[in-house]
Image (cartoon, rainbow, N blue to C red):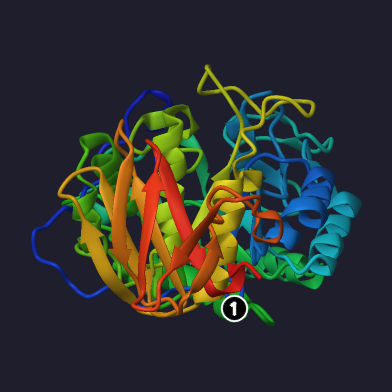
Amino acid sequence: MQHRFRLLGGTLAGAMTVACTATLAPWQSQAAPPGEKTVTVTMFERRYADVAAACTDQLGPAGFGHVQVSPATEHIQGDQWWTSYQPVSYRIAGRLGDRDAFAGMVETCHAAGVKVIADVVVNHMAAGSGTGTGGTAYTKYGYPGYFQDSDFHTCRTAVTDYADREDVQNCELVGLADLDTGKDEVRSTIAAYLDDLRGMGVDGFRVDAAKHMAAADVATVKGKMRDPGFWVSEVIHGAGEAVQPEEYTGIGDVDEFRYGGHLKSAFQGGDLAQLKSVADGKLAGASARTFVDNWDTERNGSTLTYKDGAAYTLANVFMLASPYGSPNVYSGYEWTDPDAGPPSGADGWTGTHAQQAITGLVGFRNAVGSAELTHWWDDGGAAIAFGRGDKGFVALNNSAGALDHTFATSLPAGTYCNVAVAPADSCDGATVTVAADGTARAALPAHTALALHVGAEVG
């Protein structure tokens, strides 16, 4: 939510810096939410009842470890997606479902083996005045039962200078009432809200607009909680800005916005070889949550989006196959109006989380674990391949022509299903044979991927 309305105006100043250096640094260790299944999927603006169904039917069977859901707070009325990011109370009474629906979702997802990350908005409250989605009457700086005028910063003007820390963290993000998170009473109220979500079974939090709160304030809120769980902070990197992502790594993981920009540069520029150094100039892998896009970046043009078709899918394949960071797959909905809210029915969703190239690579990542990167190969252009120790091997062809190549791998000899195109349990001929010397010849059509792993050996 960091530059929300700058985004709605079509820009995200200073938010993305593509790191494409020539020096090849070692790939960093993997960041991850707790547990053996490390892939998160963000089900953006999905109703909680629908998330529950997805956990049972799709996410659990595919091996996703976590699902991130949109904010569970009462918010301003309106059809736009960003109304979810203007809370008027900490009651669960928004368009995505009530408290019972939320609790049912958590229980159902846990039964399917999927943990839940709640997107939480605690930097600010709503602007203006009115009646919230749960019937609460509010005014700016007056939110009954939660906050009053003295709980907000005295700077009552919009943030304008991202080189000024005081401006960024004490003034109002696009006019939203900025909570004084340096105040103990405010911290306690926020911590109580998060404790309540934890009490309902939520496993962790994605902290919206964390950049607009001092890292020490966020850490103190976390410290007030009984059992804070997993945390990831939204902190957009901006060159020359006063507040940087590294300040928040002591609290938990941090969303690495530079990663998506790097992937866009590689996949649209025809130079996938640069991805060998994808970790350069970014957060250490143990702290970085990676993503191809999210709801902000898909609207401001700083990353690839579902509208990029095969290139977008291949970028997700790369993210899931490579060892840098902890991957977060984004699954949203189709849009032409960037303000448009979610579909009201079953149609209009992208369904990224259920595509074979994605589910197959979730299984791939679970199978390879922390295995090292080996056998990097590239053609200097739109094709790359690499292994994950003796556990897996992946190749990507982002060119307009077919790729026929004999690759060196560390896989044991055998016949493997290409899980990027077919489920391992019903491969239906989409197989590749690895010879006794570890080589594998494969033909990849244009804009496709190959992914083999030890859990998908045929027979």
Kindly identify which residue carries mark 1: 34
Work out which residue is located at the far top of the displayed protein and give it: 336
In the image, residue 188 above or below residue 14: below
Residue drawn at x 27%, y 55% is 165
The C terminus lies in which quarter of the figure? bottom right
In percent of width and height, residue 22 lies at 8, 59
Q: Is residue 167 left or right of residue 153?
A: left
Between residue 310 and residue 231, name the one nearer to us: 310
> In which image quadrant can residue 205 be found?
bottom right
Residue 118 is drawn in which quadrant? bottom right
Residue 189 horizontal side relative to residue 306, left or right? right
Q: Position of residue 361 (x, y in %)?
A: 53, 58
Q: Is residue 218 above or below residue 1?
A: below
**Residue in the foreground of this view, choosing between 214 and 145:** 214
In the image, what residue occupies the spot 74% across and 70% down?
Answer: 198
Decide: is 195 above or below 383.
Answer: below
Residue 168 can be seen, yes or no:
yes
Could you say where residue 104 lies in the image, as x and y percent from the top left?
89, 57
Label 1 residue SS: loop
Q: Amino acid at mark 1?
A: Pro
Looking at the image, which is closer to me, 326 or 418?
Answer: 418
Residue name at image x 54 percent, y 65 percent: 416
Task: Name the spot of residue 150 as percent of width and height, x first.
Answer: 56, 53
